[in-house]
Image (cartoon, rainbow, N blue to C red):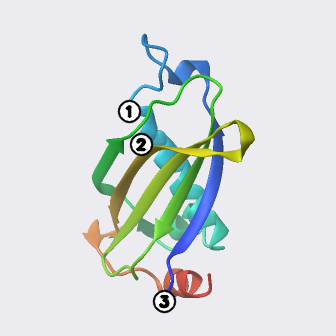
Amino acid sequence: MTDPVSHAARIRVRYADTDQMKIVYNGKYLEYFEVGRTELIRALGYPYAQLERDGILLPLVEAHCRYHQPARYDDLLTVISEVREIPRSTLRIDYRIVREDNGGKQTLITTGYTVHAFLDVERQRPVRPTPAFLAALGNS
């Protein structure tokens, strides 16, 4: 993998995502990261369901989120998810969330990353990613 593998997923902020200050509650951004991660892996042609059928789980072992600007109800957000390195026993995904403003301008809302371990479902032990998953990353 020479270039990062990336995918963009769109999310419309729901009223239920906001807090008393009328902005997106801070914990929701990890859910938005999950949407981006799931859609990125699906776009590779090797979705989570296939990983699980192959006996692999991807538990979260680390997360980081930096808030740049608030998002509000009904904002249209784009979650850009990127894999920059070939995974070994963990998979790091970097994220940028931008708001689509009037006139096509984008405002950076949040940046962050998550790290997931490849875990054998039966033995509950860390493993390397499957050759099929690595191939999917390399073919993107």
User: Quick one: SS at disc 2?
Assistant: helix
Q: Is residue 62 above or below residue 88?
A: above
Q: Disc 1 marks which residue? A: 27
Q: Residue furthest right?
A: 103
Q: Residue 4 placed where, x, y %? A: 50, 77
Q: Decide: marks 2, 3 in contact (CB < 8 A)?
A: no
- Tell me if label 1 and label 2 are in contact, CB under 8 Å: yes
Please state if 85 lies on the left or on the right of 17 as rendered: left
- Which residue is drawn at the image coordinates 41% and 80% (left, top)? 129
Q: CA distance from mark 3 to mark 1?
A: 33 Å
Q: Amino acid at mark 2?
A: Leu
Q: Amino acid at mark 3?
A: Thr
Describe the element under mark 1 as helix, strand or loop: loop
Are the residues tagged 3 and 1 within 8 Å (C-beta)?
Answer: no
Task: Find disc 2 in the rendering and name its residue.
Answer: 30
Residue beneath label 3, please? Answer: 2
In this rendering, position of residue 54 left or right of residue 73: left
| Rendered position, 64 above or below 75 | below
On screen, residue 102 above or below 33: above
Amino acid at pointer 1: Gly
Q: Residue at x 35, y 57 (%)?
A: 114
Which residue sits furthest top?
20
